Amino acid sequence: MRLAVPAYREVPFPGEEVLARLGQEPVLSPGPWSQEFPEGSPPWVEFAAEPQAPVFFLGDIHGDRVALEGVLSAIGSLAPEGGRIVVLGDVVDRGEDSLGCLLRLCHGMADARYPVTLLLGDHEDALSWREEEGELVSSVTWSNFTQEFRKISGGREWGAALVAWLQRQPRLLFFPSGIFAAHGGVPQQDLLPRLTSRQSLSSPEILQDFLWNRLTDARRKRPFRGSRGMDFGRENLLEFCRQAATFLEAPPRLLLCGHQHPFGGWQWVPAGEKEGAPEAAALCLHTSFQRVSIPGEDPLGTPCFARYLPQACRKEGEEALTVFALQPPPEKVWQTCRRKGGVP
């Protein structure tokens, strides 16, 4: 796959469908919360076969169920015959319906037409359960999911199961095409000598970098181990891809990630050059109406998601990678969503 800048398209907000879904309260049940590691694979790392259907990548959702329902509806229209959905972490916090978003994705995991892979984000990784107090706690700021959870009837009975289920979700996903996905980024250069095998990808220090590191448009960033996460640059991404190519059958070239909260909903960061195209690149996505506030700017952003079309289902002239932006809903629908409590 040539690492060209993704195509970009806007899709309408499916207002009536979203309102109908918001009117259906999710079932508060720990039933879907069970998942075992595939036998013989490194814990928390998934190596997928080349897909035979479209793959959709969602960035940070952050409790924004209106955006999530809108994107899921759009995916159904774009791929009526089905497709895989990969959520790049940070489903919880910031918004007001973190649990509703999690449960919605749980139901999707049982849908054979649109199977969901949920990659752990730093906001999920930061959650823990205090058994003695029967309380959900978080080690990050903007952790309002813990307050939301305290209001849930019966939450003490299955809070530990929820945290255990989240901790069993994968952190990394690799495709034979060279696409790989993680919430945050790649390991910084001081850890690259430790990357020598598939199993080494699942070491705690390396997984922490995949979840917590943040991509910048800088050329290079030096490691700083004073906190769980750090910035990395284009050359750091390129060095990881080259190192991983020494032990992976399919060399990674294109990172799909969240965590960065790009202002326009998506950001394309190329690295290096090979045969007139980037040798490696990253596509950062944000799938929520919420964005970092800037004085004088609209506080509501544009939820974006990406579609990868494998060669098996790509028609002539179709792009391998496309970013879709969900247009804002009409004001009437927006106000109705607010009254239903689905908009932060």
Image (spheres, grey):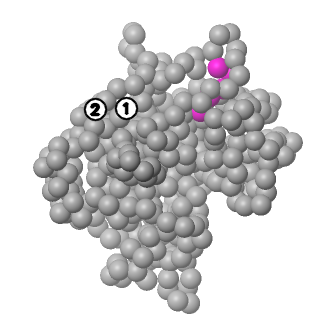
Q: Secondary structure at mark 1?
A: strand
x, y percentage for residue 256? 55, 37
Q: Is residue 256 left or right of residue 273?
A: left
Residue 313 or 269: which is nearer the viewer?
269
Q: In the image, is residue 290 above or below residue 262?
A: below
State the image coordinates of residue 223 (x, y, percent, origin top left): 79, 48
Image mark for residue 11: 2
Q: Residues at badges 2 and 1 in contact (C-beta under 8 Å)?
A: yes
Q: Amino acid at mark 2?
A: Val
**Main SS category, magenta section:** strand
Query: Could you tell me which residue is drawn at 38 percent across and 46 percent down?
Result: 297
Q: Is residue 117 visible?
A: no
Magenta extent: 278-282
Whether residue 131 is visible to the viewer of this picture, yes or no, is yes
Alpha carbon distance from label 2 to label 1: 7 Å
Instruction: Report which residue position mark 1 lands on.
Output: 324
* Amino acid of disc 1: Phe
Whichever of callouts 2 and 1 sits on the residue coming sooner in the sequence is 2
Quarter the C terminus occupies: bottom left
For residue 241, which quarter of the picture? Answer: top right
Asked if 188 appears above or below 324 in the picture, the reply is: below
Q: Position of residue 160 (x, y in %)?
A: 51, 76
Q: Nearer the viewer, residue 258 or 46?
A: 258
